[in-house]
Amino acid sequence: MSKQKRGDVLMAAETGSGKTGAFCLPVLQIVHETNTLIAHSKAATAGAASSSSSSASQVTMSLSDRDATFAIAEDGLLCQSRSADWAGARATQGIAKGRGAAWSDALWFCFSRSAHPSCCPCAGTVLGKYYYEATVTDEGLCRLGWSTITASRNLGTDKQGFGFGGTGKKAFGGQFENYGLAFGVNDTIGCFIDMDAHQIFFSKNGSRFDKAFDIPTQLHRMPFYPAAVVKNAEMRFNFGAQPFKHPCPGFEAVARCPRDQAGQSAAGSANQKKSPSALILEPSRELATQIYDQLMLFKKYLESDIRIGLFVGGVAAKDQMAELRRGVDIAVGTPGRVDDLVTSGSLDLSRVRFLILDEADGLLAQGHRQLIQKIFNGVPKDLDNGRRLQMIVCSATLHSNDVKALATDLMHFPTWIDLKGKDAVPDTVHQVCVKVNPAQDLASAAKTAGCPERVAMQTDGVHVRDAPNIRTHPESPEALSEKVKKLKPFYLLRVIEALKMDQAIIFCRTKLDCDHVRDFLLAAGGSNALVNAYSCVCLHSDVRDRDGAVKQFKNGEVRFLLCTDVAARGIDVTGLPFVVNYTLPDTPEVYIHRIGRVGRAERMGLAVSLISDVPEKVWYHTCANRDRGCTNSDLTEKGGCTIWYDEPALLRGVQAHVGENVAELTGDFALSTQTLADGKIVYGEKRAAAGVDEYQAHTAQLAPSVVELAQLEVDAQYSFWSLKSRQW
């Protein structure tokens, strides 16, 4: 009977709509059922496992850990790719560790000799040393060796894979160096690894070459797998099930690696009870903590004890490693810490059956595409029970090119579950904008804002080198850009006062902008941050500072929380009345996500955007320093680290994306019934009961989908119960 293979899921839902429960509850239930089945079958399988532990295991190239064009024959040992591109794969078993004995100089001397007398001290001795062979059976390019489970399948192009190629080059970290001799069709290459000495070397037709690689310290605890990558070539592997053409005394076949030294197959095993069944990746510590808290809340209703681990920064890594050694069923973490734990070998991905990327757009915006690929490479795609890895991608903004590209590259027949449609502004969120005109005099702007003349905004320093030109050419683009930077904070004060903002999140483009706006607000309201007319704090990356800032804001100790998009991920403040875009984001999706901070739980919210009338020159660091001490204010096309930021164009993009215009506040910036059709509204409070009609319309719109989902649930339950009477 063929097993049904599930497709993956992309789920789009508005922030605060319950999408967390939509993936947490099923994952908890399935992990609970899996643990129960494992517990019931443990006694039955123990004897069989014990009786087979001493024999050679069946090691092949892995069907689940290979590139699409890497073909594997039925025996699992003859492999080829006829593609013009490189295609790679790993074996189903690796070597997890040695036996603790160092490789002595005497043994190395003996190994380097071409003959081994019967009295050789290494004969019959294996100290964490393993070997396999591969024979080139058709013309083409190939490279083979060893890699970790998370390494790129293009062997030797990253720092977790070690390869030896047919052109006589060894490869590691994308560096190719002369080594050994070139090889081709009918040549047999021997691949050696010494897990105690942490060394790798190769042979050609029985002639052994010198050491090729020292395994870096950070990889010493990682299992290593036989690996190969080919281009229009064919190879046959021998992991020890058949006699080797060129056996080497002192080295054991990979297939005869003892169970306690064997790295787990990339297809996973239910026997690895300490490894997580689900990995949930979150872009921020706050979001990860929220998911963890919800899982802990839900799990108390299940009979089995599901172990849930939270792996984020700000907690001692050694404590988290100890937790992983004790065993975790569901791992929730942030990219940095998860990457560290995977790289160190502490977080084993070989039993993961659910890979969940929450706030996927945020993960991609933070630059974690490569990490996602690394994790994906390390998890099994086909499980022992015939099922497939289930990948779930969630976000409030799935309709972005980056997310679509991710789905195309990694997901298996993904199904889009769109609970919100194209990005739209919720009915509970009103949006307005204020145009900042550089023609206004700074002194009059300060006076209108009620700001003391001594208070001025420190700008980002983009125009320091332009100062002479600005003085002589006050209408130049650089002069107007600098003027906008100095005017915006006064407009911000006017908006705060005109709209009587008692609490708001203020989004800035960079951390530097956040710091400067904070300093300006505190200077305008008084010196002390906590007893200040414009009390505010910045939300940055330091864990303790973040926790303190969020607590102060939620408790009402400060009025304003300044943050960037990255820092704000996971921050949820009930009844938040206002959001201010000090600078518009560069994509409509991020704009939707920002203003979605208000208008939750049927409470009304207002989003205000300050829009420069002219393009503004801003930092856009592409340098290695990433803004640390960089003063290169040339444009990026001239090798610098600045761009022109066109907010009017960005606003037009937002309006086209959401299908509605953003009303402009003019004059005294007061709201009017003409500006907002709803009339008098108290932001932060629940909207009037008149919205019942809208609810009914929304319910009617969703009704067909709900009926379809209900029928699918009935069918699933019927299918489950019908298994009892099925004849197998």
Image (cartoon, rainbow, N blue to C red):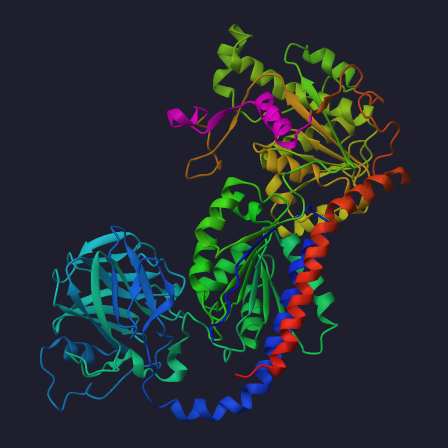
Q: Position of residue 98 (x, y in %)?
A: 34, 78
Magenta-colored stretch includes residue 657: yes
Outermost residue toward the top in this view: 472
Q: Position of residue 301 (x, y in %)?
A: 75, 72
Q: Is residue 674 left or right of residue 453?
A: right
Q: Which residues are magenta?
A: 633-660
Q: Nearer the viewer, residue 132 or 219?
A: 132
Question: Is residue 265 positioned above or below 291 on the image?
Answer: below
Q: Position of residue 328 (x, y in %)?
A: 58, 72
Residue at left 56%, top 32%? 586
Q: Classify residue 126 by image quadrant.
A: bottom left
Residue at left 58%, top 35%? 510
Whether residue 290 is visible to the viewer of this picture, yes or no, is: no
Magenta-colored stretch includes residue 237: no
Q: Position of residue 93 (x, y in %)?
A: 36, 75
Q: Nearer the viewer, residue 67 or 182?
A: 67
Question: Is residue 55 positioned above or below 25 on the image?
Answer: below
Residue at left 50%, top 80%? 271
Whether residue 348 is visible to the viewer of this picture, yes or no, is: yes
Q: Is residue 273 left or right of residue 126?
A: right
Q: Nearer the viewer, residue 556 or 691?
A: 691
